[in-house]
Image (cartoon, grey):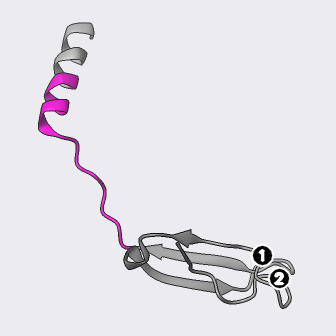
Amino acid sequence: MTQCVIDPTRKKETLDLIATNLIEQVNCVKVIPGISYHKVVYLELAVMPMQIASSLSARYGSITKSTG
């Protein structure tokens, strides 16, 4: 596991943690000012939505046709 947040998020402490075993999927991690004394962690991931298998889509279509 790799900890992604290295900058402090409250005063001098890092309270917000993001750990991953897929560090290659992490594009960007930033600690930015928040609206209070606590900062915001911004995380950007390189992920693509999963596609539904065509057989599952075909089965779902036949269920909705028979019930609707």
- Decide if residue 41 is on the left or right side of residue 9: left
Residue 25 in magenta?
no
The location of residue 61, given as percent across then percent down, is 18, 23
Q: Nearer the viewer, residue 30 or 33?
A: 30
| Helix, strand or loop status at disc 1 | loop
Picture quadrant where residue 24 is located: bottom left
- Residue at 30% of width from left, 63% of height from top? 48
Magenta segment boundaries in residue numbering: 46-60
- Residue at 41% of width from left, 71% of height from top? 22
- Residue at 13% of width from left, 27% of height from top? 58
Amino acid type for the residue under numbered disc 2:
Arg
> Residue tagged by mark 2?
10
Amino acid type for the residue under numbered disc 1:
Leu
Q: Mark 2: few, some, or many residues within 10 Å (few <14, many ≥20)? A: some
Q: Mark 1: few, some, or many residues within 10 Å (few <14, many ≥20)? A: few
Q: Nearer the viewer, residue 48 or 13?
A: 13
The location of residue 42, given as percent across then percent down, is 59, 77
The location of residue 56, given as percent across then percent down, is 19, 31
Q: CB atoms at circles 2 and 1 under 8 Å apart?
A: yes
Picture quadrant where residue 29 is located: bottom right
**Residue farthest along the front direction in this orientation:** 1
- Decide if residue 58 is on the left or right side of residue 35: left
Count of numbered tags: 2
- Quadrant where the C terminus lies? top left
The location of residue 62, given as percent across then percent down, is 16, 18
Q: Nearer the viewer, mark 2 or mark 1?
A: 1
Of callouts 2 and 1, the N-terminal one: 2
> Residue tagged by mark 1?
15
Q: Nearer the viewer, residue 21 or 10?
A: 21
| Helix, strand or loop status at disc 2 | loop
**Residue farthest along the top direction in this orientation:** 67
